[in-house]
Structure formats: structure tokens, C-alpha cells
Amino acid sequence: MWSEPQPFVVSVSVKTRGCDGYPDEDSDESYNLSVSEGQAVLRSVTVWGALRGLESFSQLVYQDDYGSVSIIVDFPRFAFRGLLLDTSRHYLPLHAILKTLDAMAYSKFNVFHWHIVDDPSFPYQSRTFPDLSNKGAFHPFTHVYTQSDVMRVIEHARMRGIRVIPEFDSPGHTQSWGKGQPNLLTPCYKGDVPSGSFGPVDPTVDTTYKFMESLLKEVKFVFPDSYVHLGGDEVSFACWQSNPNVRTFMEKMGFGKDFTKLESFYMERTSIVWQDVFDYHERVRLLPDTVLEIWKGETYQAELSRMTKAGHRVLLSAPWYINHISYGQDWRNSYAVQPQNFSGTEEQKKLVIGGEVAMWGEYVDATNLNPRLWPRACAAAERLWSDEEKTLNADLAFPRLEKFRCELLRRGIQAEPLFVGHCKHEYDGL
Amino acid sequence: MYCLLKCAPLILAVAVCHGWLFGDFVRKQELNEISLWPIPQKFQSSAVAFKLSPASFQIVHAKQSSAGPSCSILENAFRRYFEYVFGDLKSRKKVYDSDLVELQVWITSADPECDGYPSLQTDESYELSVDEPSAVLKAANAWGALRGLETFSQLVYEDDYGANNINKTEISDFPRFAHRGILLDSSRHFLPLKVILANLEAMAMNKFNVFHWHIVDDQSFPYMSRTFPDLSQKGAYHPFTHVYTPSDVKMVIEFARMRGIRVIPEFDTPGHTRSWGNGIKDLLTPCYSGSSPSGTFGPVNPILNSSYDFMTEFFKEISTVFPDAYIHLGGDEVDFSCWKSNPDIQKFMVQQGFGTDYSKLESFYVQRLLDIVAATKKGYMVWQEVFDNGVKLKDDTVVEVWMGNKMEEELQNVTGAGFTTILSAPWYLDYISYGQDWQRYYKVEPLNFPGTDAQKKLVIGGEACLWGEYVDATNLTPRLWPRASAVAERLWSDKSVTDVGNAYNRLAQHRCRMVKRGIPAEPLFVGHCRQEYMGL
């Protein structure tokens, strides 16, 4: 006898409105999921929590052919779980970025840190300063992100509960900016004469700050997240030092020979510009002296102690530079990171708001991005979402991650193997 | 390093690792710069440029050529290289005059070898003369013509108006080494046919001429044997979806032949055989825990006649399936602990007077295996341990040196004993690391070992190996290319071609060319290609 199959119903119940909004740093991503025979009930506070719950549900369905009774109560350990892509060292076609967002959602990443421009190229097509990409991109038509490309990324991300934080790194890392914006960068000198090459942004002239104001005004308009990343690191002082106008300015300001003071001066003025440009009406709470920092270093635990002791909120990315490849199962190194394992008080540890996996682009483009990102980034994804005590053992995580990798393949993500073995359905392409 | 910023809560500072070390090699690339890879032995180019129009240019057989339309290798290649040069149909709409009307391909030997297979003795030399109205490519046989066609396609470039150009050029070329191989491992991970074929295509672009197919190993046995179907039925990851059928194997062999690439299969024994035991009862040695079997198995059991009967039947089949004159028999990394634990083997050791020297038992097996394979009229290749353990090898045996430790000494010993050898030790491309490691592969000089000229002549080439523990179709192609290209030039071009800076510029362009032709070769460093990789 053949009987009609009963539909399996998943009912989703969300407490607060917010379908038309954007996720932010305070979004509640918790959810309850209970699965029983013939039905599942998913409850969450926000739509973002519902997305996380649906992802978990989809992973349960794959595992259990017969659907056993399960009850899941879930929420992320850290609110900021990010992934950085670098589209300046190599241009990444739009579909590569969108695919990355898809895969991020499968691992519950919720921040896309878009390191969109840097020294080698400026692919961001600015409406205010079209020459920036016209002269600064690898190619003004084929290697740019139009305004509509950017909007697509933002909406694709929003649909997956992912915030998009763009980074316009300055005053260093700006070689490509100078191509389309003459007089922005500091001319370097050889003795008394300009050498022809350029250094960081020129912090001594008003035109610089007027430019930054206009640019950041546009950025604020284009990117809905309340955060933008202004970079501010790895500034080489040699060029500033060589320029007589800069030296004069240093004296005038009483900076002496300390160029870090000049750099701070630039960053402060730039950030004040950002603050002015920022539209307050969405955010009530703003603490003027709170700083979020991501940093890189061998001794990141010491840095964590120091920064949180000084009261700063921090993000960890130092041990998660997965552009650094090596032979073997290096996902285990990412997995072993313990973001709150540093000497400090409970209050200090609360200041760690999350972390980020970084895929810098020196050796990465669309030919190798996906296998290099996945499933290695998944190790940090679990570290940032799950309870640490329950997930300390990498050997126990291995079989789960192995299965998850095959699932990623099935979903069309070109995730590389962890070790010898096979998936039911192997990757079909090149 | 961090940036202390006491300001609005919206600042995030990040530290970035900048590629300072490799800044020297990022030079502004001339778009029209010749980007030959590997660089020919003799190459002369002038500034005189000729236009090439897809509407009127043709690749044809020269009147005097011994090959004609019946030569499928050349017919196939003419079409392939026409497409490489002129791109897809869309970009062929441009209409302009052609200075160059044709490329004539002239096979000079009486036998063009169109219906044969390439071998170690194949003459791959060619001469290319580019002048208007006809360019001429001369080669002794079809294999040399294939090499010349690849070079010809690399000479064509697009000018500022999008028209195809080629400069007046004279080239005389031949490979420095005759054995230029790539090893792929389809046991640790199954490799779908598509990926194998795409990489054969990429090999041809780099003038590689040997595909060393490490087809089976401990983890899985995907080779479908007609004589012993249980081998893949019980030993493959999946008996239907993760196997190479006889027709799959034929396809690989023919696809390779069309590109002048030899296919040398490796059936590695007596170690690396765990998956063989699933399908053949009593083939592997049962390990013992004290006086009773532990349930696990070790290398092939060398004391049973059935093992040798099996090998005889099995290699009879292999010798008919694979047309190349050589089969690789492995012989590496044999773990003695299982043999040592087995009482029957212990008895055998005493009987044979081997004492406690298990390498003697290993050699006993290998010797018999080599004799079995020799009877099939094939030559064999072996890993260096077989030589190191003193096994008696046929004169034409090729010994593959793979151990990084004491590499020069090994080369000296092997060639000193009169055996031809190939080098793969410095070219294990599965050992990935951060940065431009292609330079390390490029800098290897295979003949840098103490020895006479006669000895050095015995080094017939090398292989770039991509072992499969961490590699499958998802990451194979970008991991292999363009890193293997560094090995390609080292094995083809003259010993004096060592300038890494010049190599960088050419290789970066060659890489973009591979991407344009559909091979997802990863970037060398910061930069871009006119046409980025569009597949995902």
C-alpha cells in the first residue's frame, strides 16, 4: 500500500520586526530549534537569529536520514565573526565575492570586512572621484566594482545576515589613490629635489582633509553599516622625512622628529571627519574613547592583555591570517586559538568582541580563493560561535569538519580536502 | 604592530603583511613583451611585426611534409592552436588584413609517427621561421611539431587595437632533458577524469611529455581491472563513482598521445598496497600480535607463490592496457614491522639465510617482480630504494631519486652504477608554503653533483610530483600551476637560463595565458591578467 507522504513542516517564529533592516553589532542571533516527527519549530528574537537557525536545521537534515528528535538552544559566543577579503592585490570578480558570502553564511560568519583598495589597485568606482578607479584600477572597465556591484554585495550579504564593513586604508597603503588624485600623496625628495615617487597621504595640507571628507561622505552613503575601517597602519616614514614641507610642518606642530605623532594627527583628523559625516539618528550610544582594534603579532596574548587593560574593545585576527599556507592540516592551528586566554580580569575578557579570518590577496585570486578559504576558515568560525570548553579537541572536531566539507562541496563551494578520503559527490569542475 | 587611536568608536586599525621581499620582481610589464615559456634553445626576434587575421590565416601541412590530412595528431593540434591564438568565435569578428597568410608545418622524416606513441628516444626538436607571407615550422616528426606549435602560439600577441601580431622570428629548439614529467596521485583522493584531462592540456602548454600516473596506493584502488574486477569493486572509495573504467583509461592515454605525452602508470608494490588486499585474498601479509593474527595487514606477502601468480596475471593485463614502453613498479617505503611479526615469514627468512635483514626479503620480492614484468617486454621504473637495496636491475631501468636527504650522493651512486635516473626530490609540489616558492624549484640544477660527463648524461630528466594527501579536484590545478612551470623550464631550456627576474616577467604572462586558455593557474604575486579566471 502506498500512502501520501506527510509534509515536513518547519515553522519559523520571529519575535521582533527587522526584515528590512541591516544586522549590526548588537543584533541578537540566538534561536531555539526543536525537531520532532513531521515537524520542526524554529524560534528567534530577530530575523538574523532565524537565519542562523535555518542553517543549523539544514545541517541536521543532511545528517539524519530519519530525523530524530532534537532540541537546540543556540547563540554565538562572540558577536563579531568576520572574514576579510583583499580586492586590491588581485581583483576578485563579483561572483567570487558573492560565493564567499554564501559560504560564510554556511559557517555563520556575520561580518564581511572588504579590504577594497590598497597600494596596487583602486577598484572601487567612486561617484565623487571617478578618476580614482579610472586611473587607479588595474583596468578602468574590467577590474572595477561599480556602484551597482557594491549594492549587490551589500544586499546579498544582508540576505544572509552579514554586515559589510569596507576598509579605506590610509595614510599608508595608498599608492593607487595618487594616480587619480594628484597632490594627495606626499612627494618624496632626494635631497632638495622631488624624486618622482610618492609616499603616504600628505597630512600637512587642507586639501587632503577636504578630499577625505568628500570620500568618506560618499562611503557613508553607499555602505549602510555604522562602521568603516580606516586602516592607519604600516606607514613608512621615510618619504615624510625626506619632504621639506613635512619637516617644516612637524616643527610648527611641535612634533619634533616623532613621526608617529604626525600619523596620529592624520588619523584623528580623518576620524573626526568621519564622525562629522556620520549620521547619528540610527545610533544612540557612542563612546568617544572606545576603540576597536585588530592586530597581528606573535605575542597576541600580551597585546590582548594590554589593550583590554586600557579599556579598549578588541577584535582578534593575528592568529587567523589564513593566507599563510603551509603543508598539512593547518586548520588545527586556527582551531587551537583561544581568544580569551590571556592574563586579565573578567571585565577585560568581555572586551573581546570577536575576531576575523584574513585572506590577504598577494598570492590569491579567483583561481585559488575558494579552496584556500574553505574549509580552513571554518575552524575559526566554530571557535568564534561555539562554547570553547565543548570544542577544545580537534580530533573530535575532525570527523564533523570532514563531513561538513563534503556538505560544502554538495552546496557548490569548492572546499579543499582536510586529509585523504572521499566525498560521495566529488567536485565536478576545475 | 598596532595603531593607538583615541577617537570615535568607529576606527579599526589593521596591520598588513606587505610583500617587501618580492618587491624587486614586480616590474611594469610591457604588454607586448615576448612571454615564451619555456624559453627555446636559440631564439632571434626582430621588431618587424606581422598581422595575423583569423579570417585569412591558416595552419597547413607543407607540400613537402611527410604528414598530411590523415595525421590526426596534427589535424587536432592545428584546430587547438588556432583556437588558442584567436580565442573564441566572438573575438574573431574583427576584420583586418593579414600579413601572415599561413603557418606551414613540415615533417621531414619519412615516418611522421602520427599513429604511434612518443617514447624516451623521441626527437622533439623543431625549427620555426616566422616571416611573411608564410611561417614555416619544421620538425622530424609530429611530436616536434606539437612543441613548435605551442611556441608559435606563444609568439602571437595583441596590439593596442586588438589585432593579433607576431614578430619576425627565427627559432631552433630542442629539450635539454628527454623525460619531463608530472606525477598525479589518484589514490589518496579520486581525481575525476575532467581534472586529469585539463592538466594534460596544461602540461602540453608547458612542454611536459610524461604523465606519471600514481593510480593506486594504500587508501584506494580506482583502477578497474578486467582480470581482477574485485580490486576496484572492493578497493575503490566507491565501486561505481570513484573508479577509472577501461574506457576512461583509454581516454587518458589517447588524450595524452594527441599532445605528445607518454602515460606511465605506477602500480607500487610491495608496500603501499593496503587497498589491494580488499579484493585479493591472501595477497597481503597478515600481521601478528604475539602468536595470533592481529587482524591488520602489511605489504604484499613475498613468501607465497600465489602472490607471484597474481602479479604475473596482473602485469600481463597492465602491459596490454598501457602502450608506453615503461611501467613504474614503485618499491618505496616498505615497512618491515608486519613481516617481522609473522612467524611464517620468520621461518622463510631462516630458510633463505637472510638472517634479520628484511631488505633482503624485500629484494627477493622485487627481483621476482622485475623478472615477471620484464617477461611482458616492458622496461621499468623504480623508486630509489630498489637500487639502494642492491636489487639486480635490467640495464634500461630508470631509477627515480625522490629522497631529499643526500640527493647529490644518490645521483652520483645511481649514475655511477650505470643506470639512467630521473630527479624528483626537489620538486615535491605538494609541500606548499607561503610566498613565491616557484623560485626555489626554478633554481634547482639537476646536474649539480660530483660525476663524470658520462654519468651526467644518464640523468635523463625529472618529475614534479603532486602527492594527493591534501589534494583533489578542488585545489589540484591552482596548486600545480604555475609552480610546475618552473620545473618545465628547468627541464627544457638551457642550463644557463637562470635569471629569476626575467623568468618572473615571462612566467607571469605565461600564467595569464594559461588562465585565458581555461586553466586556473594561481597568481605568482600581486597584479592582474587582462582576462581573469571566470570559472569558479
Image (tube, coloured by chain):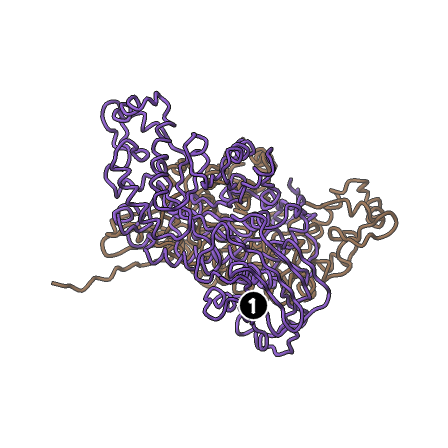
Observer-nearest residue: B362 or A195?
B362
**Image point 36% across, 51% down: which residue?**
A56
**Image point 31% across, 33% down: which residue?**
B298
Considering every residue shown, the one lying at the far right of the view is A192
Observer-nearest residue: B231 or A155?
B231
State which chain is coloured brown: A
Whether residue B334 is situated above or below residue B8 in the rendered picture: above
Considering every residue shown, the one lying at the far front of the view is B110
Left or right, A301 with reference to A254 = left
Whether residue A36 is situated above or below residue B421 in the rendered picture: below
Observer-nearest residue: A235 or B17?
B17
Left or right, B444 with reference to B315 = right
Image location (x, y in percent) of residue A192: 88, 49
Image location (x, y in percent) of residue B486: 58, 48
Q: Amino acid at mark 1?
A: Ser
Q: Secondary structure at mark 1?
A: helix
**What is the chain letter for disc 1?**
A
The answer to whether residue A316 is visible is no
Which colour represents chain B?
purple
Image location (x, y in percent) of residue B367: 36, 34
The answer to whether residue A53 is visible is yes
